[in-house]
Image (tube, rainbow, N blue to C red):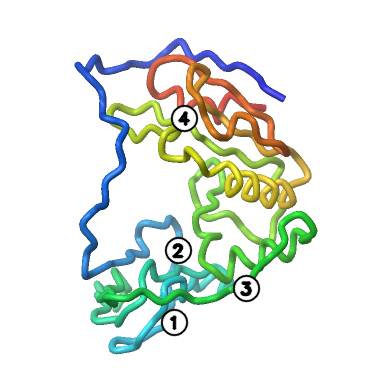
Amino acid sequence: MSNDIKIKKGLDIKLKGAAELATENAIISNFYTVRPEDFHSVIPKLSVKVGEKVKAGQALFFDKSNENVKFASPVSGEVIEISRGEKRKILAVKVQADKTQEYHDFGALSVASAKAEDIKAKLLASGCWAFLKQRPYDVIANPESSPKAIFISAYASAPLAADLDYVLQGKEAELQAAITALSKLTLGQVHVSVAKNGNSPLAGLTNATIHKVTGPHPSGMLARKLIK
């Protein structure tokens, strides 16, 4: 099912030209830092110590108020520094990446037959749950609560923002698995907003209500507030 949302108020910066739709291999860094302050209202507790070896996906720290909410290392390597501030507050965990990456295996899951509890357990264990945000305060969603609905913004209207239609091209199977999994976490609907004049890989997916958005920036963000 598809609905149209038209935003009238806003502002587009008139820039000449556009970014080329091309993919390049980025320079790989030797060091990666995860900062708890990037996640609102999180009180971090360490799962690792300096000198410890970790795999990509392994937890570096967890939320003191909910130990099931973990924050994973983006790479495998050695924890070389834990920065602290006043009252020994954890500010950052720094990892020196291995030349050859190793990944923590969380096991396979059949999304089609999995129950909501199974999907939630995988998201929590792998650290992916930290990227599910709860409105209106942009805090990490409470895993003990069932949301009324889930909203996904696949339209970035900000100047020089990445073209999500291009970035997600060819990922339809992965996106469908993600939508199907999320649909089991709510009794309501999964709402996805895409550009009306775009060619989003999400536009043809099932188990979601698609909203086609037009209008000046910040239409990509405002659309979520207008969906009921």
Q: Nearer the viewer, mark 1 or mark 3?
A: 3
Q: Nearer the viewer, mark 1 or mark 4?
A: 4
Q: Earlier in the sequence, mark 1 or mark 3?
A: 1
Q: Secondary structure at mark 3?
A: loop
Query: Of the residues under marks 2 and 1, which one precedes in the sequence?
Result: 2
In front: label 2 or label 1: 1
Q: Residue at x 64, y 28 (%)?
A: 210
Task: Read off the residue under disc 1.
Answer: 47
**Residue 211 falls in image quadrant:** top right
Number of the label disc, if any, that sits on residue 107: 3
Q: Residue at x 44, y 82 (%)?
A: 47
Instruction: Indicate the secondary structure of the residue bearing disc 1.
Output: loop
Residues at badges 3 and 2 in contact (C-beta under 8 Å)?
Answer: no
- In space, the residues marked 4 and 3 are separated at their CA atoms by 32 Å
Amino acid beneath label 3: Gly
Residues at discs 1 and 3 in contact (Cβ within 8 Å): no
Mark 3: few/some/many CA within 10 Å (<14, 14-19, 20+): few
In the image, 146 versus 76, the foreground residue is: 76
Toward which corner of the image does residue 166 lie, by quadrant? top left
Q: What residue is pinned by disc 4?
A: 155
Q: Amino acid at mark 4?
A: Tyr
Which element type, helix, strand or loop, lies under badge 4? loop
The residue that label 2 is drawn on is: 42
Separation of residues labelled 2 and 1 (CA atoms): 15 Å
Instruction: Say above or below: 151 vs 197.
Output: below
